Image (tube, rainbow, N blue to C red):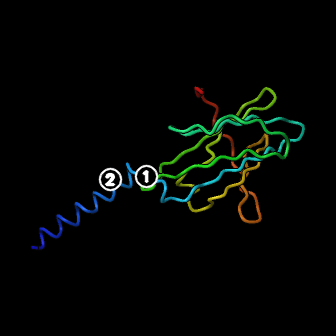
Amino acid sequence: MGSVSKIVFLVSMLLTILVVLQFGKANSFLPTVYEHIINNMSNTVLGVHCKDKHHDAGFGRINFQEMYTFSLKPHPIVSVTLWFCRFTWNNDFQHFDIYVQKRDAKLCRDCTWFINSSGPCRIKGTSLDCFPWNPKVAIVY
């Protein structure tokens, strides 16, 4: 087998593997990420609805200190996975990108968030990493 034939063979094998990972059951090779969302607002029932472009984790209602959990699979090749949640309480609502693969992939596979009226805070080691809410825009659910 000549050197050009070996290169063509290797490139075709690599492309075959990439196609299988992209369109096959690639997600079975990736670790599942678990998102735990805790209502940290006393005397308030928190509505939670999380989804990405293709999946919907469903709506949940959680009382103070209760937890809503869903799982997701990050994209196997490109860091493009994005899950966002809509939070509703009393007469208010906010949105937050709860899982951004570029931001979160190396930080946690079992993420715990405390939801406060001022924004969500993620447990990071022994401290909290707090974030602002997304800007309010019209999102169709």
- How far from the left and from the top, in percent, is residue 47? 75, 34
| Mark-to-mark CA distance, 1 and 2 | 10 Å
Q: Which residue is drawn at 65% across and 46% down?
A: 70
Q: Residue furthest left?
A: 2
Residue carrying label 2: 19
Q: Circle 1 — which element?
A: loop
Quadrant position of residue 89: top right
* Image position of 86 with respect to 97: above or below: above
Image quarter of the C terminus: top right
Q: Which of marks 1 and 2 is in front?
A: 1
Looking at marks 1 and 2 on the same chain, the residue that comes earlier in the sequence is marked by 2
Q: Which amino acid does label 2 sit on?
A: Val
Identify residue type, mark 1.
Answer: Lys
Q: Is residue 108 above or below residue 132?
A: below
The residue labelled by disc 1 is: 25
* Quarter of the figure that contains the N terminus: bottom left
Write the residue at 76% across / 62% down: 127
Where residue 5 sits: x, y (%)? 12, 68
